[in-house]
Image (cartoon, rainbow, N blue to C red):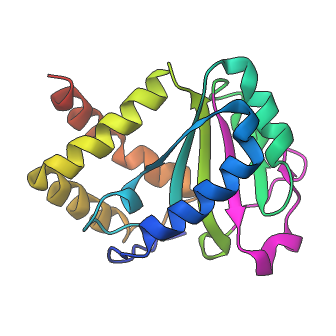
Amino acid sequence: MKVSLSEYDPKWPQQYLIEKEMLQSKLGFLKPMIEHIGSTSIIGLSAKPIIDIMIGVREEIQLEKVVDALSQSPYVYVSIYDKQLPFRRFFIVVKEVYSELYPHVLTTENFIEIPHQHRIAHIHTVPIDSQWWEEHLLFRDFLIRSKEHLLEYESLKKKLSKIEWTNGNEYAEAKAKFIQSVLKEAKL
């Protein structure tokens, strides 16, 4: 699969707010922190047109309460990543027109790759005291402040978008070295 990048769309912040409102209505009892992360959160940066959202919970034990609240349409809980990242729960928000095509929980037994064009958003739920939470906000905020790093990241993403990947995780791994170097600089 190739990663299809879109030029920055000024509608992305509004799409995030719509998703955030829906999440708050389902998860308000947990009083979560909800942040727009990833490339769609950075004005001027090209991105896959999928909104990345990070939900922060106070305690890791609350992750299962999020799973219970979101394991229904339009959310698809991708449980297969729980072993790799036990402190995170990952969901895909599927466009309504495609929601009946996918189970509400993807496991190793029923896993299918949901095409990017069927997705609205990715939701990453983690404890707010985790390194994951801290580093995703730090990376976003640093790119917002540093035009030089933003342009470098954009160039890397465009180069990587020309490569045929097995899945989106491979694409993400190819960006990891750059992201780690930016985080190192941001922490100085």
At x 82%, y 50%, the residue is 106
Q: Is residue 69 above or below residue 58?
A: below
In the drawing, does residue 122 fall left or right of residue 179? right
Q: Is residue 31 above or below residue 151?
A: above
At x 31%, y 35%, the residue is 138
- Quarter assignment of residue 73: bottom right
Percent x, y for residue 66?
76, 37
- Quarter assignment of residue 89: top right
Percent x, y for residue 184?
21, 27
Which of the pair 20/86 is nearer the observer? 20
Report the label total: 0
Q: Is residue 159 above or below residue 125?
A: below
At x 61%, y 49%, the residue is 123
At x 47%, y 30%, the residue is 133
Q: Which residues are magenta?
A: 88-114
Look at the image and say whether residue 63 sits in the magenta stretch: no
Rendered-image quadrant of the C terminus: top left
Residue 79 appears in the rendering: yes
Percent x, y for residue 54?
54, 43
Which of the pair 163/128 is nearer the observer? 128
Q: Is residue 50 above or below residue 64?
A: below
Percent x, y for residue 170?
50, 50
Which of the pair 164/183 is nearer the observer? 183
In the drawing, does residue 91 fall left or right of residue 142? right
Rendered-image quadrant of the N terminus: bottom right
Look at the image and say whether residue 90 sits in the magenta stretch: yes
Residue 48 appears in the rendering: no
